[in-house]
Image: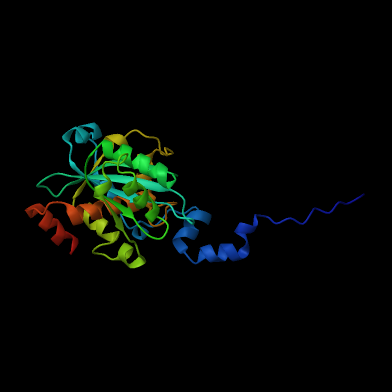
Amino acid sequence: MQRFALPKVPAWQVKHSRAALEAVATDPAMFNRGYRMLAINPGDLVFPSWVKCRQRGLVLAELHRRRLPAYIGVDLSSPSRPGNAIAVVGLEPGSLHRYLLEIVFGNWTSPETASVLAEVCSRHNVQWIQVENNAYQGALIDWVRKGKDEFPYWMKIEPYTTGQLSKIDRDIGLPALEVEFHNGAWLLPWSEWDGHPPVCRCDWCRLDAEFRMYPKGASFDGIMAVFFARDAANKWAPRTTAGRRMGRLNQR
């Protein structure tokens, strides 16, 4: 009886080599989710109160008709992280409430991003726009400011320089958003999500997944766009009694 030897091929691709698996295993939460099919421990998540902000009776079209003062945040791609996000946050005058008015994701060049941003601005009562700004992302601001005729909001755009410390600091970074979610400062128009299937990948559902899964999700571009919009509102919204209370709330 003739015997044939099986070819010597790896059981999995090189990216799943022993060294790669051992590297992933250094993060227990990621290893349990990706290789053991175990759910992430709720204690690992940064924004557990995000789901408390859902308002099923809040209709986005009605918010748009109210023309709330709007602050826009833009998170841009980099050579190592493709993808862009634009978030619009509305403030209710004289109130602590912040409303998510729009979220848009895409893979755009700087001219394309400027065009999309102009479309977003045309739908809202824009007060300020804040854009992540470092060596790569500054091209958008330059493009917008040079195209004044095509971009009527050019004078309202400002850069924000990110850094690891500013992202994790409890007072000014991402964790401070959880304090606001927990205290009911944010209201989400859940009518935009309600009824979507679990596998939906629309822009609203993608943002929802980012907040629910952070920091273990596949992306966080939308979160950063919301962060920039929220930071713009904190910096430039008119100072009211409610605004001063919000400032004290964030310092707790």
Residue 189 as seen in the image, left or right of residue 218: left
Residue at image x 88%, y 51%? 3
User: Foreground: 176 or 147?
Assistant: 147
The reply to whether residue 213 is visible in this rendering is: yes
Can the viewer see residue 36? no
> Residue 199, image x and y in percent?
44, 39
> Residue 79, how many percent across, how many down?
49, 55
Q: Nearer the viewer, residue 216 or 129?
A: 129
Name the side, left or right, on which 207 lies relative to 57: right
Q: How many marks?
A: 0
* Horizontal side of residue 249 vs 172, given as left or right: left
In the rendered image of this protein, does residue 130 appear above or below residue 164? Answer: above
Q: Residue furthest right?
A: 1
Q: Where is the C terminus found, in terms of image quarters? A: bottom left
Which quadrant holds residue 158? Answer: bottom left
- Tell me: 104 left or right of 190: right
Q: Position of residue 213 (x, y in %)?
A: 38, 52
Front-lying residue, 83 or 28: 83
Residue at x 58%, y 63% (from the top left corner): 20
